[in-house]
Amino acid sequence: MSREVRVRFAPSPTGPLHIGGVRTALYNYLFAKKMGGKFLLRIEDTDQGRFVPGAEGYIQESLEWLGIAPEESPWNPGSVGPYRQSERKEMYKQYALDLIEKGHAYYAFDTAEELEAMRERLTAARVVQPQYNGITRTQMKNSLTLPTEEVKARLESGEPYVIRVKIPLKEDVRLNDLIRGWVMVHSSTLDDKVLMKSDGMPTYHLANIVDDHLMGITHVIRGEEWLPSAPLHVLLYQFFGWEDTMPQFAHLPLLLKPDGNGKLSKRDGDKLGFPVFPLNWTDPFSGEKSPGFREQGYLPDAFLNFLAFLGWNPGDDREIFSLEELVEAFSVDRIGKSGTKFDIAKARWYNEQYLRSKPNSELVEFLTASAQLEDVEIPLEKAFAIVALVRDRVTFTGELWKESRFVMVAPTEFDQDVAAKKWNSDAVKVLTSYAEALDGFSETFDAISAKSLLESTAEAEGIKLGKVMQAVRLAVTGLGGGPDLMEVFAILGPAEVAKRVRFALETLKKID
């Protein structure tokens, strides 16, 4: 291709950005970067009745969090703006009128009641899919059936109307989809879609064709749900005389429910306990809150790596890719045709791999940020020690603090199930002696010396350490399990360990 590659992501601000939309944005971004082109974002807000406050900002924040911000957008405009369709309203009508002039569109004055009556007639006649098409339009109230003077009078009087495309009666419409190959549809199966609504706003079908042409879009990479509309869009390019610059189409496979039975929805995420939006979202009308991947502790690079593999594969057995590596490896011809099951376990696996590969310095930032939410300040040296202790036990950033909170906040309650089974007279004997031994301990206190002292204490009491080890953990951490206990002791220091042991001895009842 001699032209610069230009692709666009064109969401509607009707709510939070679904992860299917995020994947579409990602594939557009990867393709543009691979081809040395530009990635644009256009807000398709022609349906003002469905506009949701905050949705546009949510889209912007989501893409910025993921590091796939477009080069041109409403908040970073280039030379082909505006980038909101509502701000381009005036230009669309001239194109609709141009189609009328060329005989490819017409005015339709049918009322809602007349349209419903038409559908009822067709249904009664056993028409499987009632629609306003090349046959039914001859029986309706439009500029193809009304006298020219009457049409003019209706327009001058301000009577409401829409502009519909005039689909040819007998024509094969073909397009070569980059993912699905050749697609052919006979025009008799298409209806005369509305191009311009009665409020003067264009429909998606007109606006996206005009905008893609004016913005120099070379490739349209979008969801499979738009494939049925693609033949109409091809016809519109032909009607306008823009065949030579018509973009190539690629329709992405659906994201499916985990069981593969149908398209993934918010309801599925709610039911199965995982997010379907990149960020937290609060509905401005109902107040309903929906969780986001970011707030649940997913790292943006891990999330992108996971999304990239939902429908695409590199052709080898590699699974871990940086964004730059994804750009290098990406190709449209390796996107599958069939839908892809959404596997939240795989998303967690990716996050775990990325989190564990990060340097301790980054994990310290996550840890201290979480601790500060509880007004707990962790000294830097201790924070590094804690991260080294728990980094291989976590999947999400928030778990760094959750798994180590007991280090900074001494327990005031104890796992009663463990206490019932393991807290006994032997445990009390060993812990009482161990606390006394810690009081006079003046050597270097590390994991080795902490264990050595505990072993000698148990031996002096004639008790095998293994019999009381879980009780020792319970006394110091309040829990029945966790990271290496002697490493915990080394972080706490002898005085703090002794203090916690004595509190447990006072608090827990002796159970024989």
Image: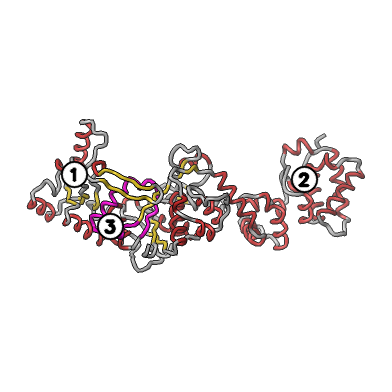
> What's the residue type where badge 3 is placed?
Glu
Q: Residue 101 falls in which quadrant of the image?
A: bottom left
Instruction: Give neighbour class at mark 1: few <14, some 14-19, many 20+ (Cα, 10 Å).
Output: few
Q: Is residue 476 left or right of residue 75?
A: right
**Residue under pointer 2:** 473
**In the image, which is nearer the foreground, mark 1 or mark 2?**
1
In which quadrant is the C terminus drawn? top right
Seen in the picture, residue 238 relative to 480 is either above or below; the reply is below
Prevailing SS of the magenta stretch: helix
Span shown in magenta:
218-247
- Quick check: is 259 in the magenta stretch? no
Seen in the picture, residue 429 relative to 380 is either above or below; the reply is above
**Residue under pointer 1:** 111
Q: Is residue 169 left or right of residue 262?
A: left
Instruction: Give neighbour class at mark 2: few <14, some 14-19, many 20+ (Cα, 10 Å).
Output: many
Q: Residue at x 41, y 55 (%)?
A: 55
Q: Residue at x 58, y 53 (%)?
A: 320
Which numbered disc flags the more N-terminal residue, 1 or 2?
1
